[in-house]
Image (cartoon, rainbow, N blue to C red):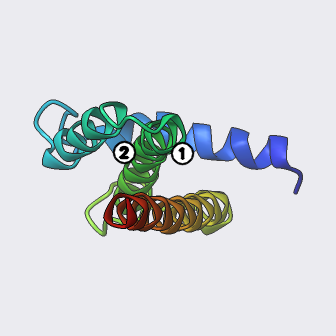
Amino acid sequence: MDDVEQVTQVATLAENSSLHTHRVSEDQDPRFKRVADYANAAIQKTDPLAANLGVVNSGLFIIAARLQDAISAATDPNNPEPADLRMLQPAVDHYLRVTRQIDRFIQLELRLSESAHGHQKGE
């Protein structure tokens, strides 16, 4: 299966109306509030790289949360439409790739922060 087919299947999974029956709106979901807090803190950083990394990573957090919601809804035993695991696999793969990238950016942010604090102490 090529990338275009995988993206189409993930989009179809997310658009399936039966998957949104248990979904909390983004305004009510505390995860999205914390992501917004993270993005706001990131944009305040003086280092442009650190600021942009935080903003991009916050976008990845949102994508991960939406994929997680779609996967959870598709695998909910109360869902009237059983999940087609062939359709679900690309969503799981994308979720895992996004979370790996989030981890990479967090590690980079931590190194940048340590480097900045090391330079401030040495000055």
As measured in the structure, the alpha-carbon distance from the residue carrying label 1 to the one carrying label 2 is 8 Å
Residue sitting at 48 percent across and 59 percent down? 112
Element under disc 1:
helix
On the image, the x and y values in percent for residue 88 come to: 58, 61
Whether residue 49 sits left or right of residue 38 in the image: it is: right
Report which quarter residue 84 is drawn in.
Answer: bottom right
On the image, the x and y values in percent for residue 58 come to: 40, 43
**Residue ranking furthest to the front:** 123
**Amino acid at pointer 1:** Leu
Residue sitting at 59 percent across and 38 percent down? 12
| Label 1 Cα neighbours within 10 Å, binned few <14 / some 14-19 / many ≥20 | many
**Amino acid at pointer 2:** Leu
Numbered circle sitting on residue 19: 2
Pointers 1 and 2 in contact (C-beta within 8 Å): yes
- 63 and 36: which one is in front? 36
First along the sequence among labels 1 and 2:
1
Q: Locate the N terminus and report the quarter of the image it occupies.
A: bottom right
Q: Is residue 117 above or below residue 33?
A: below
- 14 and 86: which one is in front? 14
Numbered circle sitting on residue 13: 1
Element under disc 2:
helix
Q: Is residue 23 above or below residue 112?
A: above
Residue sitting at 34 percent across and 39 percent down? 42
| Label 2 Cα neighbours within 10 Å, binned few <14 / some 14-19 / many ≥20 | many
Q: Locate the C terminus and report the quarter of the image it occupies.
A: bottom left
On the image, the x and y values in percent for residue 114 come to: 41, 68
Residue sitting at 35 percent across and 31 percent down? 43
On the image, the x and y values in percent for residue 46 come to: 38, 34
| Total residue callouts | 2
